[in-house]
Image (spheres, rainbow, N blue to C red):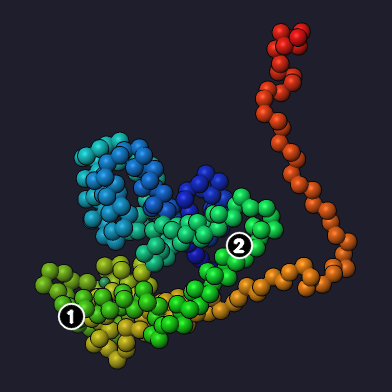
Amino acid sequence: MNVFTICSDRQKGLLQAVPTVFSNCYHSYCMRHLASNFRSDFKDLLLERLFRRAARTLRESVFKETMEKIKAKNERAHKWISNIPKENWASFYFKGDMYDVLTTNRSECFNAVLKDARKLPITSLVEHTRHQTTQFIQKRQKLGSSWHTKLTHYAEERIESSLRESCQYTANRVRTHEFEVKSLETTNSVDLITRMCSCRAFQTYGLPCGHAVAAINITEFDPYDYCDECFDAERYQDTYVEVVHATLDRTQCHESPEPLMTILPPLAKRPPGRPRTRRTDRELKG
Ligand SMILES: [Zn+2]
């Protein structure tokens, strides 16, 4: 089984279930949920911003420096953050593939789409869900087919940005696949076989960083040869290739050979007021 990443809201049951059921997966904690809990406890925008910065940075020195700043400002906040294993929320220490995704926003968005259906009766709920799913897929089919590029829109933009950034670097080949990439202030090391850069962006985002593009530019290859295939526009289109077919009305349904099962409605709610057994002696005496 492939190792993959599960991003969750750190709900108590999930904290126990994920390592048990998905023992070989990496578990990341949604930064939006963490920051929201942090905000309720500390109500300090600057501290929250520092917390988010510590989560996003790919440099250990920046992580440590940011955590020190938090400690100097509020020791209790520093302790609060330190109690959560950094391997589960800080990009620098996370071992799995995050692709720059620090939140569960994608599933929350789908959750919001189906929110209105929750109070509907069962058949309407199923129909509403089917209708929303059809629209969800159709919208993405349309978007995917509008791209005439090799990669998705998001990935193309990131590559464009890396291409612009690469202009400030000079790359030198150290050995066949290893390069030293220099600017006026920095030196980074790029390995094109392992697809790694010492800035960590290449391996974290699955797309060549500016240093990697500078290195690739002095080879016979192309930056597109070093993009994770999950960013292929064709992959995106394949994801939404299936359709949810229309559900026909009752007159067009085939009779089931199985006897129909009667599903009873839920038990009626108890009428308001105290239960009879808890009536006071005085009421019983009348
Ligand atoms: Zn880099």
Q: For ligand 1, tell me if the residue under mark 2 lies within 8 Å.
A: no
Closer to viewer: mark 1 or mark 2: 2
Q: In x, y percent, where is residue 236?
A: 48, 77
Q: Is residue 37 above or below residue 178?
A: above
Q: Which residue is mark 2?
A: 129
Picture coordinates of residue 88 (x, y %)? 41, 53
Mark 2 element type? helix
Q: Position of residue 240 (x, y in %)?
A: 54, 75
| Quadrant for the C terminus in the image | top right
Residue furthest bottom in the image: 220
Of residue 1 and residue 263, the one placed in the foreground of this image is 263
Q: Is residue 171 visible?
A: yes
Amino acid type, residue under disc 2 in the picture: Thr
The answer to whether residue 150 is visible is no
Q: Which image quarter is the N terminus in?
A: bottom right
Residue matched to label 1 = 167
